[in-house]
Image: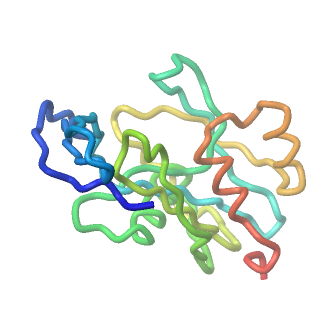
């Protein structure tokens, strides 16, 4: 199968955390040019803070899109020029006040490749321990709590964890990462 050839794009809207573009592509089979809407967004990260007691430091955060609370691991956007690993360490400290002995990259996913251009990188923070108070952004409010790592699959299966990128991070977690 051949890829579609990108012809051009028009910026339709600049928003605080993403831009909306109309992008034109030529299908490989000679059909007319097609236009699509693409959300241009910075890369995202999330990080699983695993304590020496094998608990995961989670946060309960209000999310405007669902007008409700979700159970999550720390996460956020990469700042301009910031490497995903650096963003993960920063978000871990901001949202939990934790630092880690070692941070391991688990992998990445496309959050929604039908309409977005970015990646979400997932990390594991080993031997995570509190070193300071959390320092959330002005538009954030959350509660932190611990969940035993062995209970995470049940939290996902029961719907207590519904954030797709958090589920993806735990799916990327392998036993060899825990060493």
Q: Position of residue 171 (x, y in %)?
A: 72, 57
Residue 35 drawn above or below residue 47: above
Answer left or right for 158 relative to 99: right
Check the image and name the residue furthest to the top.
67
Query: Percent from the top left, x then y, of residue 100?
Result: 60, 73
Q: Position of residue 58 (x, y in %)?
A: 67, 46
| Residue placed most toward the observer, 167 or 67 | 167
**Quarter occupied by the N terminus:** bottom left
**Which residue is at a point 19% across and 42% down the rendered structure image?**
24
Q: Camera-side residue: 18 or 114?
A: 114
Q: What residue do we see at 27% from left, 41% from top?
A: 31
Residue 55 place in picture, x, y as percent: 80, 57
Q: Quadrant of residue 37?
A: top left
Tell me the quarter of the image containing the C terminus: bottom right
Residue extending furthest toward the front: 30
Q: Is residue 175 above or below residue 10?
A: below
Q: Quadrant of residue 38?
A: top left
Q: Is residue 118 left or right of residue 150?
A: left
């Amino acid at each position: 199968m051949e890829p579609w050839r990108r012809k051009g794009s028009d910026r339709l809207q600049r928003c605080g955390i993403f831009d909306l573009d109309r992008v034109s592509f030529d299908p490989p089979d000679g059909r007319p040019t097609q236009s699509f809407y693409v959300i241009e967004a910075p890369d995202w990260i999330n990080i699983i803070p695993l304590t020496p007691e094998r608990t995961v430091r989670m946060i309960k955060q209000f999310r405007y899109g669902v007008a409700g609370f979700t159970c999550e691991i720390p996460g956020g956007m990469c700042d301009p020029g910031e490497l995903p690993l650096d963003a993960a360490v920063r978000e871990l400290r901001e949202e939990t006040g934790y630092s880690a002995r070692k941070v391991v990259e688990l992998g990445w996913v496309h959050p929604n490749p039908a309409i977005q251009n970015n990646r979400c990188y997932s990390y594991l923070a080993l031997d995570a321990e509190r070193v300071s108070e959390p320092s959330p952004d002005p538009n954030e409010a959350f509660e932190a709590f611990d969940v035993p790592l062995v209970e995470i699959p049940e939290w996902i299966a029961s719907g207590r964890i519904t954030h797709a990128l958090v589920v993806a991070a735990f799916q990327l977690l392998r036993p060899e990462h825990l060493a």
